[in-house]
Amino acid sequence: EVQLVESGGGLVQPGRSLRLSCTTSGFTFGDYGLNWVRQAPGRGLEWVGFIRSKANGGTIEYAASVKGRFTISTDDSKSIAYLQMNSLRTEDTALYYCSRWTGGSSFSQYWGQGTLVTVSS
Amino acid sequence: DIQMTQSPSTLSASVGDRVTITCRASQSISTWLAWYQQKPGKAPKLLIHKASSLESGVPSRFSGSGSGTEFTLTISSLQPDDFATYHCQQYNTYPTFGQGTKVEIK
């Protein structure tokens, strides 16, 4: 069974950093791309970034709103993806999901339950 | 970025109604479009990808159509479990989502 479990959310002051984890199981980690998607309270979904599968180069892309502040990385030995978030802003407050691609396309077939990040002084 | 515009933002309907939600892209995305259902406090659930391919296990009352810039999600006969928010997402380029359509009880 494919599972994705996010962790690491919490309350953080503006300008500070936080690292989210996405622990996966039930599939070969490097064979699939992963998205990070966020949802601000009462708002729609916003793509944050993704990492492509190893077969597609393992390259990483970011949304303009987070580029230069957020970094995606992986620990392949543990099947974990990370989202390092620096210079956090109040507008980064959201529920953060990780999700898995299917094939080479960046739609999300499987989702975690999300982890809440609140940026506030 | 490709902008995705859903309409309506809210839809009031009754059990048994035929419901149609529209998603328009700011430029052509061929058929690189997915639809998700989201219930309060839950993660989105994939319903349809490649504009019209029904995800395994999704009831056949859900269908998708369209190509280029205009797409529709249709629920042929609304069931109590279908009251939720629906999101479209293009994946022709870096993913972008519509703002969501809430289907509520009339």
Image: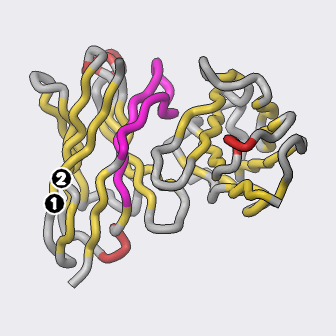
Q: According to the image, label 2 marks what residue?
A: A8
Circle 2 SS class: loop
Quadrant of the rendered structure where residue B63 is? Answer: top right
Quadrant of the rendered structure where residue B50 is? Answer: top right
Is residue A111 rendered magenta in the image?
yes
- The x, y position of residue A95, in whole percent, is 37, 58
**Residue A88 against residue A102 in the figure, above or below:** below
Q: Callout 2 environment at 10 Å: few (<14), some (14 to 19), or many (20+)? A: some
**Residue A76 against residue A99 in the figure, above or below:** above
State yes or no: discs 2 and 1 in contact (Cβ < 8 Å): yes
In the rendered structure, the residue with mark 1 lies on which chain? A
Label 2 is placed on what type of residue?
Gly
Left/right of residue A13 with respect to residue B100 in the rendered view: left
**Disc 2 or 1, which lies upstream in sequence?**
2
Frontmost residue, B61 versus A20: B61
The segment highlighted magenta reads A95-113
